[in-house]
Image (cartoon, rainbow, N blue to C red):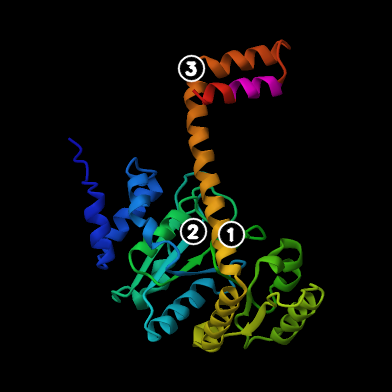
């Protein structure tokens, strides 16, 4: 007989706010699994919204995202911050599984009660994040984290979704990997608030720095707009990390003084609401697909008795009941 684990949401939330890692893990698992208790979890966490600084890290594989994240955690903990880390790993298109290995790279902080690290599978989601990441951020906010680091999958040129989730987005580059040129094609020039040239002790770092500065000069930003910072670092040696933290702080100050922080968070909430509404709509469409409404409409469209647009209107009308 399968024993169902307790879902006492108020108790889990209360323990999570006290820093209980097991309760935080349970709440994020409810989020990832789309548990029926999720609306109750979201309602309990709502008053904590906006308390944490959300910093995103993206970049191609091999640029040192996990190492940089590890050193940022160290620096931010020295400054007295409570840290949450969400590391999104790619899932296999064949098995659906994921290695979830970023916690292995961050062993230095596993015994620190002021740090919570969670690896999440992308579960086929495009854009470098998991669909559950926004709600997981809310859980970590409710658990008292005042800085949340979100590390994307880093599978190529499409990890721009992080910009809609993070207050500050770091784009990591490395000399000799062609990243500066790739940035133009990928659109990360537009999403980066801070460029971090990691492994800056390697040959080619100066050329990468010049390329990025040259692209920024072509950006044409107006008065009062943010000009992305370009910082050099060697994360594996803990060099330049304080400069990265300083650049994040400078961007935060600009966000608050310009009023952009509020706008970004409202846009984030709008995207989150839309995603949840579309998810609900897909679920209802699945119910109709199993019934007779959608098959009947499909048969009429296939026979030429009804246009696809008229069928879609009929389907939306059926969903409204």
Name the spot of residue 213 as percent of width and height, x first.
75, 81
Q: In the picture provided, is 305 more to the left or to the right than 75?
A: right
Q: In the picture provided, is 34 more to the left or to the right than 111?
A: right
Q: Quadrant of residue 186?
A: bottom right
Give residue 164's mark. 1
**Which residue range is magenta in the image?**
308-315
- The alpha-carbon separation of the residues under discs 2 and 3 comes to 37 Å
Residue under pointer 2: 89
Instruction: Tell me if residue 250 is in the magenta stretch.
Output: no
Residue at 55% over, 45% down: 274
Q: In the picture provided, is 176 more to the left or to the right than 87?
A: right
- The alpha-carbon separation of the residues under discs 1 and 3 comes to 37 Å
Picture layout, residue 152 above or below residue 203: above
Q: Quadrant of residue 232?
A: bottom right
Q: Nearer the viewer, residue 311 or 184?
A: 311
Name the spot of residue 61 as percent of width and height, x first.
59, 66
Residue under pointer 3: 291
Q: Earlier in the sequence, mark 1 or mark 3?
A: 1
Picture layout, residue 120 above or below residue 309: below
């Amino acid at each position: 007989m399968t024993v169902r684990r307790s879902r006492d949401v108020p108790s889990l939330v209360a323990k999570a706010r006290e820093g209980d890692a097991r309760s935080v893990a349970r709440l994020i698992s409810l989020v990832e699994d789309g548990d029926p208790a999720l609306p109750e979890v979201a309602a309990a966490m709502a008053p904590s919204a906006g308390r944490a600084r959300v910093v995103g890290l993206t970049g191609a594989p091999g640029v040192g995202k996990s190492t940089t994240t590890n050193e940022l955690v160290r620096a931010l903990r020295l400054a007295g911050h409570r840290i949450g880390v969400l590391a999104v790993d790619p899932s296999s298109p064949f098995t659906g599984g994921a290695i979830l290995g970023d916690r292995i790279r961050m062993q230095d902080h596993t015994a620190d009660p002021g740090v919570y690290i969670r690896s999440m599978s992308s579960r086929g989601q495009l854009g470098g994040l998991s669909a559950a990441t926004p709600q997981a951020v809310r859980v970590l906010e409710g658990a008292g984290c005042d800085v949340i680091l979100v590390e994307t999958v880093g599978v190529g040129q499409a990890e721009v979704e992080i910009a809609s989730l993070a207050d500050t987005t770091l784009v990591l580059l490395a000399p000799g990997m062609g990243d500066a040129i790739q940035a133009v094609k990928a659109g990360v020039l537009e999403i980066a608030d801070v460029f971090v040239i990691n492994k800056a002790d390697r040959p080619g770092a100066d050329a990468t720095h010049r390329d990025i500065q040259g692209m920024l000069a072509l950006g044409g930003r107006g008065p009062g707009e943010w000009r992305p910072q370009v910082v050099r670092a060697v994360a594996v040696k803990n060099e330049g990390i304080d400069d990265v933290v300083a650049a994040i702080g400078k961007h935060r100050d600009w966000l608050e003084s310009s009023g952009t922080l509020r706008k970004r968070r409202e846009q984030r909430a709008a995207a989150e609401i839309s995603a949840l509404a579309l998810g609900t709509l897909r679920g209802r469409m699945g119910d109709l697909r199993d019934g007779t409404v959608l098959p009947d409409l499909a048969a009429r469209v296939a026979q030429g008795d009804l246009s696809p647009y008229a069928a879609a209107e009929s389907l939306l009308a059926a969903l409204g009941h």
